[in-house]
Image: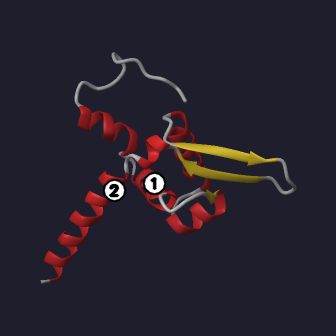
Amino acid sequence: MSERTATQLPACPVETTLSLISDKWKVLILRDLLPGTKRFGELKKSIGHVSQKVLTAQLREMEASGLLTRTVYAEVPPRVEYTLTDLGYSLKPILDAMWDWGEGYQEKCRQ
């Protein structure tokens, strides 16, 4: 994990959080890894219209931030799995709040 010093982090805690999960794909990756470990292909399929290049870049950024771990198994063909770290799992209440808000918004729009 690449460590940031206090001077490299935004002054605002909300901005700090957004800097880690502000990309739409990162939030969907978090959502899909909350139930447990997934392989790259499973993530690509469950997320949808993300390119392999973008998904790879997002996963690398999240790994560098300490939100997930990447495990490579020496098999043929190679198997790579992604798992949330404790830090990644600590974002669950934020995702739950986003879910609840989005659900309420959808209900309001249907009326």
Rendered view: 45 above or below 55: below
What is the three-letter code of the residue carrying label 2? Leu
Q: Secondary structure at mark 2?
A: helix
The local secondary structure at tag 1 comes to helix
Q: In the image, is 31 to the left or to the right of 69?
A: left
Q: For residue 4, which numbered disc appears in the image?
A: none
The answer to whether marks 2 and 1 mark residues whose Cβ atoms lie closer than 8 Å is: yes
Residue at image x 18%, y 71%? 104
Earlier along the polypeptide chain: callout 2 or callout 1?
A: 1
Question: Viewed as shown, does residue 26 lie left or right of 72?
Answer: left
Tell me which residue sits at (85%, 53%) in the image: 75
Task: Inspect this view and state whether residue 102 appears.
Answer: yes
Q: Decide which of 25, 98 is in the foreground and name it.
A: 98
In the picture, measured across the screen, residue 7 lies left or right of residue 83, that is left
Where residue 33 appears, x then y in whole percent?
A: 51, 57
Residue plotted at (51% across, 36% down):
66
Which residue is drawn at the image coordinates 49% and 42% (left, top)? 67
Horizontal and vertical percent position of residue 41: 65, 62
Tag 2 residue: 95
Residue that mark 1 sits on: 30
Compared with 48, 108 (above or below) is: below
Residue 39: x and y in percent read 65, 58
Q: Position of residue 34 (x, y in %)?
A: 47, 58
Q: Residues within 10 Å of mark 2 (few under 14, many from 20)?
A: some
**Extreme-front residue of the structure:** 86
Residue 48, can we see it? no
